[in-house]
Amino acid sequence: MLPVLQVGPMAVQLPGLLVLLGIWLSSVLIGRHAGRHGIDADVLDRLLLIGLAAGVIGARLGYVLQHAAIYFEDVRAVFSLNLTAFAAFEGAVVGILAALIYAQRKSLPLWPTLDALTPGAALFAVFVNLSQWASGDAFGAPTDLPWAMELWGAPRHPAQLYALAASIVILLIVLWLQARQEFAGQLALSWLALASGARLLLEAFRGDSLVLAGLRQAQLLGLLLLMASLAGLHLLARRQGPIGSSGGSGHGATPN
Amino acid sequence: MRRWIARRPHWPLLMAGVFLLGTGWMVWTTSPEQSAEAGRIASPHPGFAAPDFELETLEGERLRLSDLRGEVVVVNLWATWCPPCRAEMPALQELYEKHREDGLVVVAVNATDRDSAEAARRFVAERGLTFPVGLDPQGEASRLYALQAMPSTFVVDREGVVREVLIGGPVSLGTLRSLVTPLLEEGG
């Protein structure tokens, strides 16, 4: 755990820095591989920028609206740099909506666009896990295994490191699969299946799970998404013409 | 690969297998009592019991965090030489004045091991701060709260559980109020 990195007189908040670094490197990776999926890298870049900007604004506005009376009295606080004052869910909804509207206007094809975004998502997950390791969030359950790490008053599963290892393996699989992709949507859904499968598996070692009807919520969601993505893979594989044909829109195995 | 994914009944059978395994794992590894475990361990992280400390205030009184159980407590670790700490003090003072009646206490812990009691006293008098200011000459509270950057602010609920951690500042009054208001409404 290293929430603050002391650089001379400056205290750098490492978790936030890692997320920013993740966003930047992910967008670079997406731009590099966009051509493979037949998507214009500039359009994709703008899609990300619009989604991010709308997401940040939406998250702050969502938070402000939940506490409208307070912010009405202290309007300047709406613009405060504090990271706590964000509503994550509202931000995600607004960001995705904005990106969808932009994609619609640019008539981006759904599956190739999602495929093009997938390597970025897989890389970003690595940085999210690094960030959680630095902040001590997403911590593990207490254990007496020999590789337990002391955190928050108990020896615990290094759950962030399990997740980090999984996300690195998943990133490598995604990059490997990208060069061998056979139909649109294959990359995106394979990543979703892998990521939700990993969550289903690794949530078991977490010490901070939300529990719903005796089950860990994240595992339930992981299982649902895993099944949905496996079903989606099957349907897409069958839909896109007879096996052996070119499969549609210029994506596919075109190594460069 | 595509041929394989499209194949029936192989792929649906594989899905059924994954579903059974996944469900089995989920049920096998469930642990409903675990979420309650955190609240008993003292640690400066949301969901854990706030580490207890006893300090002398500027007025020479003993101040123990656990004595404030039943109130919402904002613990602010600060030093006079830290500009963002100085900048957020007026917001903390206003927060205290606004919500004192509702059961809110602000406890400013001066990191006296890297500051001086005299400087703290002067600063508090200058700014007219009325909430209790504890002195921490041994750095005990700093150690318990794993202080890495100043200011660090911990919002503790009426049960003595850490609910929010704000590292760095200055924090605005609006943000502070949005964090404490829901906790103040949790009975009391």
Image: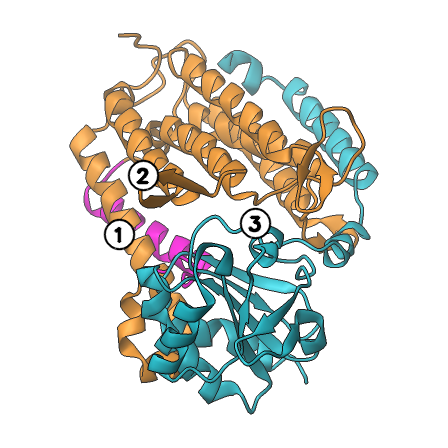
Colour of chain B as rendered: cyan
From the viewer's perspective, is residue B29 above or below residue B184? above
- What residue is shown at x 19% (from left), y 42% (from top)? A106
Q: Do labels 2 and 1 share a chain?
A: yes
For residue B116, side relative to residue B70 (left or right)? left
Check disc 3 and report the residue beneath it: B146
Colour of chain A as rendered: orange
Q: Do labels 3 and 1 share a chain?
A: no
Secondary structure found at label 1: helix
Q: Nearer the viewer, residue B102 or A112?
A: B102
Instruction: Please report, as a chain letter, where disc 2 is located.
Output: A
In the image, the segment drawn in magenta is A82-108
Check disc 2 and report the residue beneath it: A8
From the viewer's perspective, is residue B27 above or below residue A145? below
The image shows residue A6 at horizontal and vertical percentages of 38, 40
From the viewer's perspective, is residue A244 above or below residue A154? above
In the picture, the disc for residue A53 is: 1
- Marks 2 and 1, how far apart at CA: 31 Å
Residue type at mark 2? Answer: Gly
